[in-house]
Image (tube, rainbow, N blue to C red):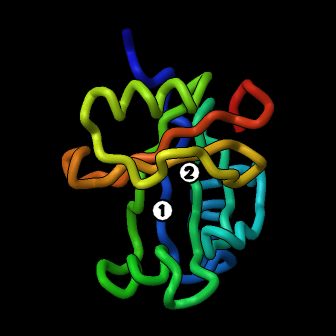
Amino acid sequence: MRVFDRIDHVGVAVQEIDSALELWRDGFKLDVAHREIVEDQGVEAVLLNVGENHIELLAPLGPDTPVGKFLAKRGPGMHHIAYQVPDIEATLQQLAEAGLPLIDKTPRVGIGGALVAFLEPKGTGRVLTEIVQPADGEGH
């Protein structure tokens, strides 16, 4: 049985949202679907529509946040890939049983009220992987 339904979004770390929107919204002509500050993750996030999927721009709220540390170490660019699932708790159990290391053993609330959880890059080919159960059940 397949673990993931579809790609939900690709996360891109940026220094500052409004500057990044000059490229993604104005240059690439992508529509902004949602903009939000997610305090517990230390980011300002913007979802941009790309067909049925999204690009998620992530700007740190400070240098000691996960995205702030990522930018200091690697600079702007792709941060993570997120896959949509219908039942995040069942998916986390399935991934744990398969021996994949989890950052989040229980889901937390992400942008737009979605439930999210991250997997350790050391177990996913060095790609930070997020799983998303949308709040509305149909996608962001």
Say whether residue 22 is visible.
no
At numbered mark 1, what does the secondary structure look like: helix, strand or loop? Answer: strand
Say whether residue 41 is visible.
yes
Position of the C terminus by quadrant: top right
Image location (x, y in percent) of residue 55: 56, 51
Whole-Å distance between the Cαs marked 2 and 1?
A: 7 Å
Image location (x, y in percent) of residue 19: 62, 80
Q: Quadrant of residue 4?
A: top left
Per the rendering, the mark at residue 132 is none
> Considering depth in this image, is 99 or 79 the residue closer to the camera?
99
Q: Which amino acid does label 1 sit on?
A: Val
Q: Residue at x 30, y 46 (%)?
A: 101
Per the rendering, the mark at residue 55 is 2
At numbered mark 2, what does the secondary structure look like: helix, strand or loop? Answer: strand
Q: Quadrant of residue 86?
A: top right
Name the N-terminal-most of marks 2 and 1: 1
Pointers 2 and 1 in contact (C-beta within 8 Å): yes
Q: Is residue 4 left or right of residue 37?
A: left
> Considering depth in this image, is 115 or 9 the residue closer to the camera?
115
Q: How crowded is mark 1: few (under 14 residues within 10 Å), some or many (20 or more)?
A: many
Q: Name the residue under label 1.
A: 12
Does 132 sit above or below residue 38? above
Q: How many marks?
A: 2
Image location (x, y in percent) of residue 99: 25, 35
Q: Is residue 10 left or right of residue 19?
A: left
